[in-house]
Image (cartoon, rainbow, N blue to C red):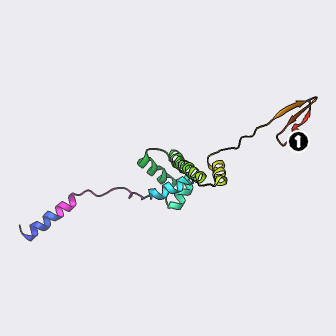
Amino acid sequence: MTKKTKKKTAKKQSKKQPKKMGRSVIKVDMDLLERLCSRSWKCTDVAYVMGVSYDTIERRIKSTYDCTFAEYLDKTKAKVRMKLFEKQLEVAFNGNPAMLIWLGKQMLDQKEKHESEVSHSGDFVFVSDDDPSATGKV
């Protein structure tokens, strides 16, 4: 082959490759997305911090995890709750029950059980729930 034929062949081959059409794909840092969602951020806030639109976040989650943002948020929050519960057990075994109780109330919706004792004495009903207005005449 001569130099001319080699150049023509190279030009023809480069012309045969199709051009990419449409907008380029916006990159989304999925690790950052997971960290923000694990802290219960709203989609609009996540999009703002990541410098992309709300719709881009929704599309990327749909294409990667096949779910909506709300479903993804629930999944990441569930992971955090599991880690928190494991840490609470570890802390409890290491002797810090105050932190264990506080975190349980804050993150796991744990509540203290309130018991009321009712006793009758003549015409009065006494309720031992530290509420003076709850005691009265029957």
Q: Residues within 10 Å of mark 1 (few under 14, many from 20)?
A: few
Picture coordinates of residue 55, whole percent (x, y)? 49, 52
Q: Residue at x 87, y 35 (%)?
A: 126
The local secondary structure at tag 1 comes to helix
Is residue 20 positioned above or below 67 on the image? below
* In this picture, residue 8 sits left or right of residue 18: left
- Could you say where residue 57 lies in the image, as x and y percent from the top left? 48, 53
* Residue matched to label 1: 132
Quarter of the image with the C terminus in it? top right
Q: Is residue 19 above or below residue 2?
A: above
* Residue at position x 10%, y 69% in the image: 4
Q: Amino acid at mark 1?
A: Pro
- Please state which of residues 59 and 116 is positioned toward the viewer in this rendering: 116
Q: Where's the N terminus, which quadrant?
A: bottom left
Position of 17 compared to 25: left or right? left
Residue 25 shown in magenta = yes
Q: Tell me the chief SS of the magenta region.
A: loop
70 vs 137, left or right, is left
The percent position of residue 128, horizontal first and vertical second, equals: 83, 39
Q: Nearer the viewer, residue 16 or 129?
A: 129
Q: Farthest residue toward the bottom?
A: 3
Magenta segment: 11-26
- Left or right position of 38 against 20: right
Q: How many marks?
A: 1
Q: As rendered, which of 96 and 20 lies closer to the eye?
A: 96
Does 94 lie within the magenta span? Answer: no
Q: Where's residue 45, x and y in %?
A: 56, 57
